[in-house]
């Protein structure tokens, strides 16, 4: 499993949008509104399951131990 940063996921989305010719064409191809796609691209919303599936990515929640200060 390869971990991706949010920026890397957005890069994949930008590439797919470019391959489709426009945000509107991409949104139509995956059944989403152009505004939602624009919001994701501009960081106003997180990519949801439809976009993640189209990118071949899944969201995984992680927890890490907090640093203990002495």
Image (tube, rainbow, N blue to C red):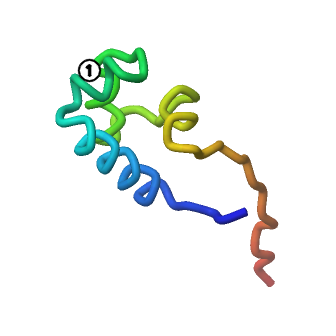
Q: Looking at the rendering, in which quadrant would you find the C terminus?
A: bottom right
Whether residue 65 sits left or right of residue 7 in the image: it is right
* Residue under pointer 1: 35
58 versus 22 height, above or below: below
At x 30% / y 47%, what residue is drawn? Answer: 14
Which of the 4 image quarters holds residue 20?
top left
At x 23% / y 30%, what residue is drawn? Answer: 23
**How many numbered tags mark residues here?**
1
In the picture as drawn, the residue positioned furthest to the bottom comes out as 70
Query: How dense is the environment of label 1, judged by Cα within 10 Å: few (below 14), some, or many (20 and up)?
Result: few
Give the image location of residue 48, x and y in percent: 52, 29
57 versus 37 height, above or below: below
Which of the 4 image quarters holds residue 3?
bottom right
Give the image location of residue 35, x and y in percent: 26, 20
At x 65% / y 43%, what residue is drawn? Answer: 59
Give the image location of residue 36, x and y in percent: 34, 23
In the picture as drawn, the residue positioned furthest to the left comes out as 22
At x 58% / y 29%, what residue is drawn? Answer: 49
Give the image location of residue 57, x and y in percent: 59, 46
Whether residue 27 sits left or right of residue 45 in the image: it is left
70 versus 41 height, above or below: below
């Amino acid at each position: 499993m390869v971990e991706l940063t949010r920026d890397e996921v957005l890069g994949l989305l930008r590439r797919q949008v470019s391959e489709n010719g426009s945000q509107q064409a991409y949104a139509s191809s995956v059944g989403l509104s152009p505004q939602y796609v624009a919001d994701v691209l501009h960081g106003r919303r997180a990519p949801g399951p439809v976009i993640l599936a189209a990118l071949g990515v899944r969201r995984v929640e992680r927890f890490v131990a907090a640093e203990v200060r002495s």
